[in-house]
Amino acid sequence: MASLKEKLAAKIPAEVEEVRNLIKEHGDKVVSQVTVKQVFGGMRGVKGLVCNTSLVEPDRGLEIRGIPIAKLTDKLPEEILWLLLTGELPNQEELASLQEDLKIRRKVPEYVWDVLNAMPADSHPMTMLSTAVLVMEKDSVFKKRYQEGMKKTEYWEPTLEDTLDLVARLPVIAAAIYRQRFNKGPRIPSNPDLDMGADYAHMLGLPNPNGELEKLMRLYLVLHSDHEGGNVSAFVTNIVGSALSNIYYALSAGLNGLAGPLHGLANQECLRWVLMVQEKFGGVPTDEQLRQFAWDTLNAGKVIPGYGHAVLRVTDPRFDAFLAFGKKYCADDPVFQIVAKIFDVVPGVLKQLQKVKDPWPNVDAGSGALLYHYGMKEFDYYTVIFGISRAMGVCSQAVMNRALGLPIVRPKSVTTDWIKKTVGAA
Ligand code: CMX
Protein backbone atom coordinates (compact mmCIF):
# COMPACT_ATOMS: atom_id res chain seq x y z
CA MET A 1 0.00 0.00 0.00
CA ALA A 2 1.39 3.40 -1.03
CA SER A 3 1.52 6.29 1.43
CA LEU A 4 0.27 9.69 0.33
CA LYS A 5 3.83 10.83 -0.31
CA GLU A 6 4.67 7.73 -2.37
CA LYS A 7 1.47 8.10 -4.36
CA LEU A 8 2.31 11.69 -5.16
CA ALA A 9 5.91 10.88 -5.97
CA ALA A 10 4.65 8.36 -8.52
CA LYS A 11 2.22 10.82 -10.13
CA ILE A 12 4.15 14.06 -10.18
CA PRO A 13 6.73 13.32 -12.93
CA ALA A 14 3.97 12.72 -15.53
CA GLU A 15 2.19 15.95 -14.54
CA VAL A 16 5.42 17.92 -14.77
CA GLU A 17 6.15 16.40 -18.17
CA GLU A 18 2.62 17.19 -19.40
CA VAL A 19 2.93 20.86 -18.43
CA ARG A 20 6.46 21.12 -19.87
CA ASN A 21 5.24 19.75 -23.21
CA LEU A 22 2.19 22.00 -23.18
CA ILE A 23 4.34 25.09 -22.73
CA LYS A 24 6.86 23.87 -25.32
CA GLU A 25 4.29 23.13 -28.01
CA HIS A 26 1.58 25.70 -27.29
CA GLY A 27 3.28 28.28 -25.08
CA ASP A 28 2.47 31.28 -27.32
CA LYS A 29 -1.21 30.54 -27.91
CA VAL A 30 -3.79 32.94 -26.44
CA VAL A 31 -6.21 31.59 -23.79
CA SER A 32 -7.65 34.84 -22.47
CA GLN A 33 -7.94 38.51 -23.30
CA VAL A 34 -8.30 41.39 -20.85
CA THR A 35 -10.68 44.29 -21.24
CA VAL A 36 -10.46 47.66 -19.52
CA LYS A 37 -13.53 46.69 -17.49
CA GLN A 38 -11.74 43.61 -16.20
CA VAL A 39 -8.60 45.57 -15.29
CA PHE A 40 -10.72 47.81 -13.06
CA GLY A 41 -13.06 44.98 -12.10
CA GLY A 42 -10.99 42.67 -9.93
CA MET A 43 -9.76 40.68 -12.96
CA ARG A 44 -13.11 38.91 -13.05
CA GLY A 45 -13.05 36.16 -15.67
CA VAL A 46 -9.40 36.67 -16.67
CA LYS A 47 -7.84 33.24 -17.15
CA GLY A 48 -4.31 33.64 -15.85
CA LEU A 49 -3.94 30.96 -13.20
CA VAL A 50 -3.71 27.20 -13.07
CA CYS A 51 -5.41 25.16 -10.35
CA ASN A 52 -5.87 21.42 -10.80
CA THR A 53 -7.35 20.59 -7.40
CA SER A 54 -10.80 21.97 -8.22
CA LEU A 55 -12.86 23.87 -10.74
CA VAL A 56 -15.90 26.15 -10.34
CA GLU A 57 -18.08 26.40 -13.42
CA PRO A 58 -20.68 29.22 -13.29
CA ASP A 59 -23.55 26.85 -14.08
CA ARG A 60 -22.43 23.85 -12.03
CA GLY A 61 -20.47 25.01 -9.03
CA LEU A 62 -17.59 23.25 -7.33
CA GLU A 63 -16.02 20.09 -8.71
CA ILE A 64 -13.08 18.62 -6.84
CA ARG A 65 -10.79 16.81 -9.27
CA GLY A 66 -13.71 16.47 -11.67
CA ILE A 67 -16.21 15.14 -9.08
CA PRO A 68 -19.23 17.40 -8.36
CA ILE A 69 -19.29 18.40 -4.69
CA ALA A 70 -22.84 17.03 -4.39
CA LYS A 71 -21.35 13.55 -4.89
CA LEU A 72 -18.79 14.06 -2.13
CA THR A 73 -21.03 15.10 0.76
CA ASP A 74 -20.84 11.68 2.44
CA LYS A 75 -17.04 11.62 2.41
CA LEU A 76 -14.67 12.33 5.28
CA PRO A 77 -12.49 15.45 5.18
CA GLU A 78 -9.43 13.17 5.12
CA GLU A 79 -10.72 11.52 1.92
CA ILE A 80 -11.12 14.96 0.38
CA LEU A 81 -7.55 15.87 1.29
CA TRP A 82 -6.30 12.74 -0.47
CA LEU A 83 -8.51 13.52 -3.46
CA LEU A 84 -7.30 17.12 -3.66
CA LEU A 85 -3.68 16.03 -3.68
CA THR A 86 -3.73 12.89 -5.79
CA GLY A 87 -6.79 13.31 -8.02
CA GLU A 88 -8.32 10.06 -6.71
CA LEU A 89 -10.37 9.06 -3.69
CA PRO A 90 -8.38 6.82 -1.34
CA ASN A 91 -9.18 3.15 -0.88
CA GLN A 92 -9.76 1.95 2.68
CA GLU A 93 -6.11 1.16 3.36
CA GLU A 94 -4.93 4.47 1.98
CA LEU A 95 -7.49 6.34 4.07
CA ALA A 96 -6.44 4.43 7.17
CA SER A 97 -2.76 5.25 6.58
CA LEU A 98 -3.51 8.96 6.07
CA GLN A 99 -5.67 9.07 9.20
CA GLU A 100 -2.94 7.35 11.21
CA ASP A 101 -0.37 9.86 9.93
CA LEU A 102 -2.60 12.84 10.73
CA LYS A 103 -3.25 11.53 14.25
CA ILE A 104 0.48 11.43 14.98
CA ARG A 105 0.78 15.00 13.75
CA ARG A 106 -2.06 16.39 15.89
CA LYS A 107 0.26 17.51 18.69
CA VAL A 108 0.33 21.30 18.86
CA PRO A 109 3.57 22.94 20.09
CA GLU A 110 3.21 24.39 23.60
CA TYR A 111 4.34 27.85 22.46
CA VAL A 112 1.14 28.16 20.37
CA TRP A 113 -0.93 28.09 23.56
CA ASP A 114 1.38 30.67 25.16
CA VAL A 115 0.90 33.01 22.21
CA LEU A 116 -2.88 32.55 22.13
CA ASN A 117 -3.10 33.10 25.89
CA ALA A 118 -1.14 36.34 25.54
CA MET A 119 -3.53 37.81 22.97
CA PRO A 120 -6.15 40.41 23.95
CA ALA A 121 -9.25 38.65 25.29
CA ASP A 122 -11.45 40.30 22.65
CA SER A 123 -9.27 39.34 19.65
CA HIS A 124 -11.25 38.15 16.66
CA PRO A 125 -11.05 34.33 16.43
CA MET A 126 -9.72 34.66 12.86
CA THR A 127 -6.86 36.83 14.13
CA MET A 128 -6.10 34.14 16.69
CA LEU A 129 -6.15 31.41 14.04
CA SER A 130 -3.94 33.33 11.65
CA THR A 131 -1.50 34.18 14.45
CA ALA A 132 -1.33 30.57 15.62
CA VAL A 133 -0.52 29.45 12.07
CA LEU A 134 2.11 32.14 11.62
CA VAL A 135 3.88 31.45 14.89
CA MET A 136 4.42 27.80 13.89
CA GLU A 137 6.41 29.00 10.89
CA LYS A 138 9.62 28.59 12.87
CA ASP A 139 9.21 24.80 12.69
CA SER A 140 8.54 24.66 8.95
CA VAL A 141 10.18 21.62 7.35
CA PHE A 142 10.33 23.48 4.02
CA LYS A 143 12.19 26.36 5.63
CA LYS A 144 14.76 24.02 7.18
CA ARG A 145 15.30 22.01 3.99
CA TYR A 146 15.54 25.19 1.92
CA GLN A 147 18.23 26.56 4.22
CA GLU A 148 20.09 23.26 3.91
CA GLY A 149 19.96 23.64 0.12
CA MET A 150 17.47 21.19 -1.43
CA LYS A 151 16.86 20.78 -5.17
CA LYS A 152 13.92 22.56 -6.81
CA THR A 153 12.38 19.23 -7.81
CA GLU A 154 12.14 18.35 -4.11
CA TYR A 155 10.28 21.48 -3.00
CA TRP A 156 6.91 19.73 -2.94
CA GLU A 157 8.04 17.11 -0.40
CA PRO A 158 8.65 19.37 2.63
CA THR A 159 5.64 21.44 1.54
CA LEU A 160 3.58 18.25 1.88
CA GLU A 161 5.13 17.64 5.32
CA ASP A 162 4.17 21.16 6.44
CA THR A 163 0.69 20.74 4.95
CA LEU A 164 0.04 17.50 6.82
CA ASP A 165 1.29 19.02 10.09
CA LEU A 166 -0.96 22.02 9.58
CA VAL A 167 -4.07 20.13 8.52
CA ALA A 168 -3.69 17.78 11.50
CA ARG A 169 -3.18 20.55 14.04
CA LEU A 170 -5.69 23.11 12.82
CA PRO A 171 -8.84 21.47 14.29
CA VAL A 172 -7.04 21.18 17.65
CA ILE A 173 -6.04 24.84 17.52
CA ALA A 174 -9.44 25.96 16.28
CA ALA A 175 -11.28 24.11 19.05
CA ALA A 176 -8.93 25.62 21.63
CA ILE A 177 -9.60 29.10 20.22
CA TYR A 178 -13.32 28.50 20.60
CA ARG A 179 -12.99 27.43 24.22
CA GLN A 180 -10.55 30.16 25.19
CA ARG A 181 -12.16 33.06 23.35
CA PHE A 182 -15.68 32.28 24.55
CA ASN A 183 -14.87 31.16 28.13
CA LYS A 184 -15.96 27.58 27.60
CA GLY A 185 -13.44 26.12 30.07
CA PRO A 186 -10.13 24.33 29.60
CA ARG A 187 -9.04 22.77 26.30
CA ILE A 188 -10.45 19.30 25.64
CA PRO A 189 -7.72 16.88 24.54
CA SER A 190 -7.95 15.29 21.11
CA ASN A 191 -9.29 11.72 21.04
CA PRO A 192 -6.99 9.58 18.86
CA ASP A 193 -9.80 7.12 18.12
CA LEU A 194 -11.84 9.71 16.25
CA ASP A 195 -11.69 10.90 12.64
CA MET A 196 -10.93 14.57 11.99
CA GLY A 197 -14.52 15.86 11.93
CA ALA A 198 -15.64 13.86 14.96
CA ASP A 199 -12.53 14.82 16.93
CA TYR A 200 -13.09 18.48 16.15
CA ALA A 201 -16.72 18.24 17.35
CA HIS A 202 -15.49 16.45 20.49
CA MET A 203 -12.84 19.11 21.26
CA LEU A 204 -15.37 21.94 20.87
CA GLY A 205 -17.25 20.45 23.81
CA LEU A 206 -20.71 21.16 22.43
CA PRO A 207 -23.64 18.70 22.69
CA ASN A 208 -23.53 16.09 19.93
CA PRO A 209 -27.09 14.69 19.85
CA ASN A 210 -27.18 11.35 17.99
CA GLY A 211 -23.76 12.22 16.53
CA GLU A 212 -25.32 15.06 14.51
CA LEU A 213 -22.72 17.70 15.40
CA GLU A 214 -19.89 15.50 14.18
CA LYS A 215 -21.85 14.78 10.97
CA LEU A 216 -22.24 18.54 10.50
CA MET A 217 -18.54 19.16 11.15
CA ARG A 218 -17.50 16.52 8.62
CA LEU A 219 -19.85 18.05 6.06
CA TYR A 220 -18.65 21.56 6.86
CA LEU A 221 -14.99 20.59 6.47
CA VAL A 222 -15.71 18.84 3.17
CA LEU A 223 -17.81 21.62 1.61
CA HIS A 224 -15.43 24.51 2.28
CA SER A 225 -12.22 22.70 1.40
CA ASP A 226 -11.47 24.25 -1.99
CA HIS A 227 -12.98 26.60 -4.59
CA GLU A 228 -10.38 26.74 -7.39
CA GLY A 229 -7.48 29.18 -7.47
CA GLY A 230 -8.76 32.73 -7.94
CA ASN A 231 -10.80 33.38 -4.79
CA VAL A 232 -9.12 35.66 -2.27
CA SER A 233 -7.89 33.02 0.21
CA ALA A 234 -6.54 30.70 -2.49
CA PHE A 235 -5.07 33.50 -4.59
CA VAL A 236 -3.31 35.13 -1.64
CA THR A 237 -1.93 31.81 -0.37
CA ASN A 238 -0.67 31.13 -3.89
CA ILE A 239 0.98 34.53 -4.34
CA VAL A 240 2.75 34.44 -0.97
CA GLY A 241 3.79 30.82 -1.53
CA SER A 242 5.18 31.66 -4.95
CA ALA A 243 7.88 33.73 -3.24
CA LEU A 244 8.87 30.41 -1.61
CA SER A 245 7.64 31.71 1.70
CA ASN A 246 6.78 28.52 3.58
CA ILE A 247 3.17 27.36 3.79
CA TYR A 248 2.72 28.78 7.31
CA TYR A 249 3.40 32.29 6.00
CA ALA A 250 1.26 31.65 2.94
CA LEU A 251 -1.73 30.13 4.75
CA SER A 252 -1.69 32.81 7.46
CA ALA A 253 -1.95 35.43 4.70
CA GLY A 254 -4.74 33.50 2.97
CA LEU A 255 -6.67 33.29 6.24
CA ASN A 256 -6.39 37.05 6.63
CA GLY A 257 -8.13 37.36 3.26
CA LEU A 258 -10.77 34.84 4.29
CA ALA A 259 -11.52 37.11 7.27
CA GLY A 260 -13.00 39.78 4.97
CA PRO A 261 -16.80 40.30 4.97
CA LEU A 262 -17.03 39.84 1.21
CA HIS A 263 -15.33 36.44 1.52
CA GLY A 264 -15.36 34.01 4.45
CA LEU A 265 -16.65 36.42 7.07
CA ALA A 266 -19.94 36.51 5.14
CA ASN A 267 -21.09 33.44 7.08
CA GLN A 268 -21.02 35.28 10.42
CA GLU A 269 -22.59 38.34 8.79
CA CYS A 270 -25.25 36.14 7.28
CA LEU A 271 -26.37 34.66 10.57
CA ARG A 272 -26.35 38.15 12.08
CA TRP A 273 -28.78 39.20 9.34
CA VAL A 274 -30.98 36.13 9.91
CA LEU A 275 -31.17 36.84 13.64
CA MET A 276 -32.05 40.47 12.96
CA VAL A 277 -34.98 39.21 10.89
CA GLN A 278 -36.02 36.88 13.69
CA GLU A 279 -35.83 39.63 16.30
CA LYS A 280 -37.64 42.21 14.21
CA PHE A 281 -40.59 39.96 13.37
CA GLY A 282 -40.58 37.84 16.55
CA GLY A 283 -40.05 34.63 14.56
CA VAL A 284 -40.40 33.54 10.94
CA PRO A 285 -41.61 36.55 8.91
CA THR A 286 -44.14 36.52 6.09
CA ASP A 287 -42.77 36.71 2.54
CA GLU A 288 -43.83 40.34 2.31
CA GLN A 289 -42.15 41.30 5.59
CA LEU A 290 -38.94 39.61 4.50
CA ARG A 291 -39.03 41.25 1.06
CA GLN A 292 -39.34 44.66 2.71
CA PHE A 293 -36.52 43.86 5.16
CA ALA A 294 -34.26 42.88 2.24
CA TRP A 295 -35.04 46.14 0.46
CA ASP A 296 -34.33 48.09 3.67
CA THR A 297 -30.90 46.45 3.85
CA LEU A 298 -30.13 47.24 0.22
CA ASN A 299 -31.44 50.80 0.48
CA ALA A 300 -29.14 51.34 3.47
CA GLY A 301 -26.24 50.62 1.07
CA LYS A 302 -25.48 47.16 2.49
CA VAL A 303 -25.12 43.80 0.78
CA ILE A 304 -27.27 40.81 1.64
CA PRO A 305 -24.68 38.44 3.03
CA GLY A 306 -24.65 34.89 1.73
CA TYR A 307 -26.05 35.90 -1.65
CA GLY A 308 -24.19 36.54 -4.89
CA HIS A 309 -20.91 35.19 -6.19
CA ALA A 310 -18.03 36.30 -8.36
CA VAL A 311 -18.15 33.13 -10.48
CA LEU A 312 -21.36 31.17 -9.77
CA ARG A 313 -24.59 31.91 -11.62
CA VAL A 314 -26.73 29.21 -9.98
CA THR A 315 -27.54 28.22 -6.40
CA ASP A 316 -24.29 27.08 -4.85
CA PRO A 317 -24.44 23.25 -4.54
CA ARG A 318 -22.73 23.66 -1.16
CA PHE A 319 -25.75 25.69 0.01
CA ASP A 320 -28.00 22.89 -1.31
CA ALA A 321 -26.04 20.40 0.80
CA PHE A 322 -26.47 22.48 3.97
CA LEU A 323 -30.16 23.00 3.20
CA ALA A 324 -30.62 19.25 2.81
CA PHE A 325 -28.83 18.68 6.12
CA GLY A 326 -31.10 21.22 7.85
CA LYS A 327 -34.26 19.70 6.35
CA LYS A 328 -33.16 16.28 7.61
CA TYR A 329 -32.02 17.19 11.12
CA CYS A 330 -33.54 20.51 12.22
CA ALA A 331 -36.51 21.36 10.00
CA ASP A 332 -38.45 22.67 13.03
CA ASP A 333 -35.80 25.19 14.08
CA PRO A 334 -37.13 28.73 13.42
CA VAL A 335 -33.67 30.08 12.52
CA PHE A 336 -33.29 27.37 9.89
CA GLN A 337 -36.84 28.08 8.69
CA ILE A 338 -35.88 31.74 8.19
CA VAL A 339 -32.87 30.66 6.13
CA ALA A 340 -35.16 28.55 3.95
CA LYS A 341 -37.59 31.46 3.57
CA ILE A 342 -34.79 33.85 2.63
CA PHE A 343 -33.93 31.41 -0.16
CA ASP A 344 -37.54 31.69 -1.39
CA VAL A 345 -37.68 35.49 -1.26
CA VAL A 346 -34.26 37.15 -1.62
CA PRO A 347 -33.27 35.94 -5.11
CA GLY A 348 -36.39 37.69 -6.45
CA VAL A 349 -35.37 40.93 -4.75
CA LEU A 350 -31.77 40.77 -5.99
CA LYS A 351 -32.97 40.03 -9.53
CA GLN A 352 -34.86 43.32 -9.47
CA LEU A 353 -31.62 45.13 -8.59
CA GLN A 354 -30.33 44.08 -12.03
CA LYS A 355 -26.70 44.95 -11.32
CA VAL A 356 -26.31 41.78 -9.21
CA LYS A 357 -25.00 39.09 -11.55
CA ASP A 358 -25.81 36.17 -9.27
CA PRO A 359 -28.96 36.48 -7.12
CA TRP A 360 -28.57 32.99 -5.67
CA PRO A 361 -27.26 31.82 -2.27
CA ASN A 362 -23.60 30.93 -1.83
CA VAL A 363 -22.10 28.54 0.74
CA ASP A 364 -22.33 31.10 3.55
CA ALA A 365 -26.11 31.52 3.39
CA GLY A 366 -27.03 28.37 5.30
CA SER A 367 -24.11 27.13 7.34
CA GLY A 368 -24.47 29.54 10.29
CA ALA A 369 -28.05 28.52 11.09
CA LEU A 370 -26.94 24.91 11.46
CA LEU A 371 -24.05 25.78 13.78
CA TYR A 372 -26.45 27.94 15.79
CA HIS A 373 -28.88 25.05 16.06
CA TYR A 374 -26.21 22.83 17.63
CA GLY A 375 -25.37 25.42 20.27
CA MET A 376 -22.55 27.36 18.65
CA LYS A 377 -24.05 30.80 19.18
CA GLU A 378 -20.81 32.77 18.85
CA PHE A 379 -20.95 33.69 15.18
CA ASP A 380 -17.66 35.58 15.27
CA TYR A 381 -16.18 32.10 15.33
CA TYR A 382 -17.79 30.68 12.20
CA THR A 383 -15.13 31.75 9.71
CA VAL A 384 -12.55 29.79 11.71
CA ILE A 385 -14.26 26.53 10.67
CA PHE A 386 -14.24 27.75 7.07
CA GLY A 387 -10.51 28.45 7.55
CA ILE A 388 -9.48 25.04 8.80
CA SER A 389 -11.38 23.46 5.94
CA ARG A 390 -10.04 25.84 3.29
CA ALA A 391 -6.50 25.09 4.49
CA MET A 392 -6.83 21.63 2.92
CA GLY A 393 -7.47 23.10 -0.51
CA VAL A 394 -5.02 25.98 -0.57
CA CYS A 395 -2.20 23.91 0.95
CA SER A 396 -2.85 21.14 -1.59
CA GLN A 397 -2.64 23.77 -4.31
CA ALA A 398 0.69 24.89 -2.85
CA VAL A 399 2.06 21.34 -2.94
CA MET A 400 1.05 21.01 -6.60
CA ASN A 401 2.44 24.42 -7.52
CA ARG A 402 5.79 23.45 -6.03
CA ALA A 403 5.68 20.07 -7.78
CA LEU A 404 5.10 21.81 -11.12
CA GLY A 405 7.95 24.21 -10.34
CA LEU A 406 5.75 27.25 -10.98
CA PRO A 407 7.66 30.55 -10.73
CA ILE A 408 7.09 33.55 -8.53
CA VAL A 409 3.81 35.27 -9.51
CA ARG A 410 4.31 38.71 -10.98
CA PRO A 411 1.59 40.06 -13.27
CA LYS A 412 2.12 43.46 -14.88
CA SER A 413 0.33 46.52 -13.55
CA VAL A 414 -0.19 49.67 -15.58
CA THR A 415 -1.28 53.22 -14.85
CA THR A 416 -4.65 54.69 -15.74
CA ASP A 417 -2.77 57.01 -18.14
CA TRP A 418 -1.22 54.01 -19.88
CA ILE A 419 -4.66 52.48 -20.35
CA LYS A 420 -6.07 55.77 -21.64
CA LYS A 421 -3.28 56.07 -24.18
CA THR A 422 -3.53 52.42 -25.18
CA VAL A 423 -7.28 52.50 -25.87
CA GLY A 424 -7.19 55.97 -27.38
CA ALA A 425 -9.30 57.62 -24.65
CA ALA A 426 -9.38 61.40 -24.45
N1 CMX B 1 -26.32 42.15 -1.96
C1 CMX B 1 -26.31 43.39 -2.48
N2 CMX B 1 -25.60 43.76 -3.54
C2 CMX B 1 -24.89 42.81 -4.15
C3 CMX B 1 -24.88 41.48 -3.71
C4 CMX B 1 -25.61 41.17 -2.54
N3 CMX B 1 -25.61 39.94 -2.00
N4 CMX B 1 -24.08 40.76 -4.51
C5 CMX B 1 -23.59 41.62 -5.44
N5 CMX B 1 -24.08 42.86 -5.21
C6 CMX B 1 -23.76 44.09 -5.94
C7 CMX B 1 -22.28 44.38 -5.81
O1 CMX B 1 -21.98 44.98 -4.54
C8 CMX B 1 -22.04 45.28 -6.98
O2 CMX B 1 -22.52 46.55 -6.66
P1 CMX B 1 -21.75 47.90 -7.12
O3 CMX B 1 -21.63 47.78 -8.61
O4 CMX B 1 -22.64 48.98 -6.65
O5 CMX B 1 -20.42 47.84 -6.42
C9 CMX B 1 -22.96 44.66 -8.03
O6 CMX B 1 -23.97 43.93 -7.30
C10 CMX B 1 -22.29 43.74 -9.00
O7 CMX B 1 -21.61 42.73 -8.27
P2 CMX B 1 -21.40 41.27 -8.90
O8 CMX B 1 -20.59 41.40 -10.12
O9 CMX B 1 -22.70 40.57 -8.99
O10 CMX B 1 -20.59 40.55 -7.73
P3 CMX B 1 -19.03 40.64 -7.45
O11 CMX B 1 -18.36 39.57 -8.24
O12 CMX B 1 -18.50 42.02 -7.57
O13 CMX B 1 -18.99 40.26 -5.89
C11 CMX B 1 -19.58 39.06 -3.94
C12 CMX B 1 -19.24 38.97 -5.43
C13 CMX B 1 -19.67 37.65 -3.36
C14 CMX B 1 -18.47 39.83 -3.22
C15 CMX B 1 -20.95 39.80 -3.78
O14 CMX B 1 -21.96 39.05 -4.40
C16 CMX B 1 -21.31 40.08 -2.34
O15 CMX B 1 -20.88 41.10 -1.78
N6 CMX B 1 -22.14 39.18 -1.70
C17 CMX B 1 -22.45 39.33 -0.30
C18 CMX B 1 -21.28 38.86 0.56
C19 CMX B 1 -21.08 37.36 0.47
O16 CMX B 1 -22.01 36.59 0.59
N7 CMX B 1 -19.81 36.93 0.30
C20 CMX B 1 -19.46 35.52 0.35
C21 CMX B 1 -19.06 34.95 -1.00
C22 CMX B 1 -18.64 33.50 -0.86
C23 CMX B 1 -17.30 33.43 -0.18
O17 CMX B 1 -16.30 33.88 -0.75
O18 CMX B 1 -17.24 32.96 0.95
Image (cartoon, rainbow, N blue to C red):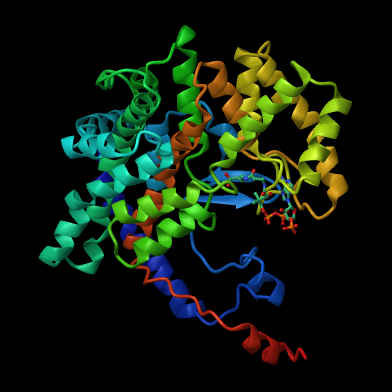
Q: Nearer the viewer, residue 110 or 42?
A: 110
The image quarter containing residue 384 is top left
Give the percent coordinates (x, y) of residue 68. Answer: 58, 40
> Can the viewer see residue 277?
yes
Q: Which of 125 and 173 is in front in this view?
A: 125
**Quarter of the figure with the C terminus:** bottom right
Q: Which residue is drawn at 66% across and 71% down?
A: 40
**Quarter of the figure with the N terminus:** top left
Give the percent coordinates (x, y) of residue 132. Answer: 30, 42
Q: Residue at x 77, y 25 (%)?
A: 341
**Label tally:** 0
> Can the viewer see residue 52?
no
Q: With respect to residue 223, does 40 lie above or below?
A: below
Give the percent coordinates (x, y) of residue 348. Answer: 85, 39
Single out the residue that lies furthest toward the left. 148
Q: Residue at x 70, y 46 (%)?
A: 308
The image quarter containing residue 155 is bottom left
In the displayed structure image, the side of residue 38 where residue 133 appears, left or right: left
In the displayed structure image, the side of residue 392 where residue 119 appears, left or right: left
Give the percent coordinates (x, y) of residue 278. Answer: 71, 21
Q: Residue at x 39, y 40 (%)?
A: 81
In the displayed structure image, the side of residue 135 where residue 122 appears, left or right: right
Q: With respect to residue 403, does 176 lie above or below?
A: above
Q: With respect to residue 301, does 224 lie above or below?
A: above
Q: Which of 408 and 371 is in front in this view?
A: 371
Q: Nearer the viewer, residue 154 or 394?
A: 394
